[in-house]
Image (cartoon, rainbow, N blue to C red):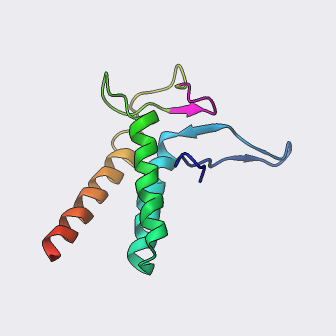
Amino acid sequence: MDKDGGLWYEYDPQHDKLIKQKHWWPQAEAMIGYLNAWEITGNEKYLQQSLDAWLFTQKYILDKENGEWFWGVDDAYNVMPNEDKAGFWKCPYHNARACMEVLKRIDASVNKQ
């Protein structure tokens, strides 16, 4: 997890460095993974990491002008060009599932109170 809330997810062992891209799907999975960790442990750190992943996604991945999520950004926050806006895994799976999971869990938390 980077200090900006985005998740670096790929490492190049031959060159001993991170791949400096933050794709859409690790951000979606980070939101849910950290939410799972918080629900299991009650540790507020995980809830904050889930929120940070969502804030990163809102700021850099969500296409506010045309809808949907960008493929990702590089380490200077430039949108990755020439990548799919939607596809088999993108839109109907990772990001849509993440948003539905978060909404479902927020609804369940509100209804408990």
- Position of residue 65 relative to residue 71, above or below, is above
Q: Quadrant of the C terminus?
A: bottom left
Residue that appears at 67% across and 37% down:
20
Q: x and y percent of residue 73 in the render?
A: 55, 32
Residue at position x 45%, y 27% from top? 84
The residue under the point 37% across, 28% down is 63
**Residue 43 falls within the magenta-colored stretch:** no
Is residue 89 in view?
A: no
Residue 44 shows in this picture:
yes
The reply to whether the magenta stretch includes residue 75 is: yes
Q: Quadrant of residue 21?
A: top right
Question: Residue 75: x and y, percent?
Answer: 64, 33
Residue found at the far top of this picture = 82
Q: Is residue 82 above or below residue 88?
A: above
Q: Can you say whether 41 is above or below 21 in the image?
A: below
Magenta range: 72-78
| Count of picture labels | 0
- Percent from the top left, x then y, of residue 37? 46, 71
Residue 46 drawn at (x, y percent) = 47, 67
Q: Which quarter shows the N terminus?
A: bottom right
What residue is drawn where x is 62% and y is 49%?
9
Q: Residue furthest bottom?
A: 41
